[in-house]
Image (cartoon, rainbow, N blue to C red):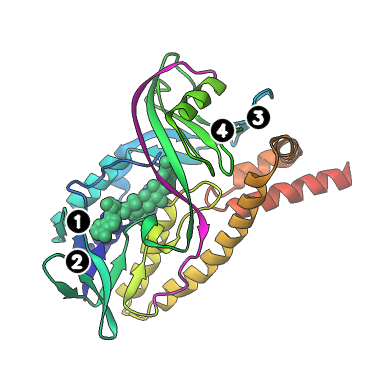
Amino acid sequence: MRVGIAGGGSAGLLAACRLSQEGFQVELFEEDPEVGYPEHCTGIVRSDFFETIRYPELSRLVLAKYSGGTLHIGDNTAPIGIDTGSVKALMIDRPAYERSLSEIAESNGVRIYKSSKVSIRKKGEKYALLSQEALQSFDLVIGARGARANPFLRLLPGMQARVKLNQRISEEFVSVLASQDTPGFFGWLAPYGGGKFAKVGLAARSRVHRRSIASILSRFGMESEILGYYGGLVVVGGVTRASPDSNYLPLGDEGGQVKPLTGGGLDLAAFAVNSMLHDLVNGDTSLSGYKAWLRKLKQSLMASEIAARMLFGMPISLKWKLAHSLLDSPGVSRVLAASDFDEHSAVLKELAVSRLTAALIG
Ligand SMILES: Cc1cc2nc3c(=O)[nH]c(=O)nc-3n(C[C@H](O)[C@H](O)[C@H](O)COP(=O)(O)OP(=O)(O)OC[C@H]3O[C@@H](n4cnc5c(N)ncnc54)[C@H](O)[C@@H]3O)c2cc1C
C-alpha cells in the first residue's frame, strides 16, 4: 500500500514512522525547509506518551515531569494548589521530537520532501496530492497539515515565550492563569530545566501580545529574561471529521483531534495513529476500528467543548468560586490521583459528583 502524507508536524511524522515500520511505502511532503520549526507548542503530553507512540527510547526528550498545578484566578486572589501525588504529564522537547521522528522515518525508507507544499485534490474517485511537479496518486492520503487546513475548527491565537527565570521554582507544577488578559482561554507557565527555565504563554479570544506575556509573568510574580517568542493557532473545538469514507484521512489538528479544554493535540494524534495502524496491519483498509474510535472521540470532545465554553465564558469571580467548590470537596485527591490526564470532561464530571456527594452527606 502506498501512503502519501501532507504535513510533517508531529502527527504526519509519527504516522510516517509507524506505517513505514509495518512495511507500508510512505512519502511525506512538508512545506517548511526544516522539521520541528517554526516551534509553536509547549510540548506537554500525558505521562505514558512515549509508550503510547511505541518509541519508549525517545523518553530522553523529556524536559520536565508534572504532578500538579497552581490555579491563579483573577488578580487579587490566592492561588489554588493541586497536587495529584503522581506524575500526570511531561514536557517534551518538541523540535527534537520531530527531528527524531524524521530520522526514524527516513531510516525506515520514508521519502521526506522538504520545502514541498502540497494540496489534496480529487482525482477521479480518489484523493491525490498535488505538488509543484505533479498530481500523485496514493492508496491512502493522510492530511496532517495542521489547524489551518480544517475550516470547521474553532481556533484561538496563542503566543508563548521561552524564559530564563531569575529565581528557581519547583519543576513539578504547571501554573495556570485565568484573568482579564486571557478571555476565552487561559495563560500558563510550565517550568523545565530544573525550574530555572519556563515556557510562558496564553491563548485568548482577543489579540495576544508580547505585553500579555509580561503581564502573565508579573501575575505569577516572576522576573525573567525572555529568550524568544513563538506562537500559533490553538484548536478549541469544531468538527472532528467523522470518518475517512474516501482514501483521505485527516489526522492531528487537521482532523480536529485536539482537547478543547487545553488545546493539546499531541496525545490524541498518537492514539489516532495507533487505531489507524491496528486496522491497516490487520488488512482492514475500510478502517472500521478507526471509525468507531473516531465516533467515541467525537462524543468525548463535544462534552469537553461544552465544558470549555462554560468554564472559559464564566466571569472571573464565578470561576474562582467554582474552582474552590470543586477542589475543596473531600474526595478530590482520590479523583485527581485516579484521573486520566486526557479525559478532561470525565475528570470534571467526577469532581462535580464528588462535590455533590460531599454536600449531600455533609
Ligand atoms: C501556543 C501553543 C501551545 C501548545 N501547547 C501544546 C501542548 O503543550 N501539548 C499539546 O499536546 N499540544 C499543544 N499545542 C497544540 C499542538 O501544537 C498541535 O496539536 C500539534 O502541533 C498538532 O500537530 P499536527 O502535526 O497535526 O499539526 P502541526 O504541528 O501544525 O504540523 C503541520 C505541518 O504541516 C505542514 N504543512 C501545512 N500545510 C502544508 C502543505 N500544504 N503542504 C505541506 N506541508 C504543510 C506545516 O509546515 C507543519 O509542519 C499547542 C499549540 C499552540 C499554538
Residue at x-position 41% and y-position 63%: 255
Residue placed under numbered mark 1 in the picture: 105
Residue that badge 3 annotates = 74
Residue 57 x, y percent position in the rendering? 28, 45
Query: Any magenta on residue 226?
Result: yes
Disc 3 to disc 1: CB gap under 8 Å: no
* Residue under numbered circle 4: 181
Element at label 3: loop
Residue at image location 47% in from the left, 72% down from the top: 242
**What is the three-letter code of the residue carrying label 2?**
Val
Instruction: Classify mark 1 as within 8 Å of ligand 1 or not, answering yes or no.
Output: no
Say above or below: 83 vs 47: above
State the mark number for residue 26: 2
Q: Residue at x 64, y 25 (%)?
A: 75
Q: Secondary structure at mark 4?
A: loop
Q: Is residue 319 left or right of residue 239?
A: right
Lower position in the chain sequence, tag 3 or tag 1: 3
The residue carrying mark 2 has its beta carbon less than 8 Å from ligand 1: no
* Residue at the extreme bottom of the image, as rendered: 125
**Earlier residue among tags 2 and 3:** 2
Q: Are marks 3 and 4 in contact (CB under 8 Å)?
A: no
Q: Give how far apart the Cα atoms at labels 2 and 1 are.
A: 9 Å
Residue 342 in the image, given as x and y percentages of width and height: 52, 51
Q: What range of the chain is rendered magenta?
A: 221-244
The local crowd at label 1, few if under 14, some if 14 to 19, many if 20 or more residues have their Cα within 10 Å, is many
Q: Is residue 36 left or right of residue 81?
A: left
- Disc 3 residue type? Gly
Of the image marks 3 and 4, the number of the one nearer the N terminus: 3
Q: What secondary structure prevails in the magenta region?
A: strand
Q: Which class describes the residues within 10 Å of circle 3: few (<14), some (14-19), or many (20+)?
A: some
Asked whether the beta carbons under mark 4 and mark 2 sit within 8 Å of each other, the answer is no
Q: Amino acid at mark 1?
A: Ala
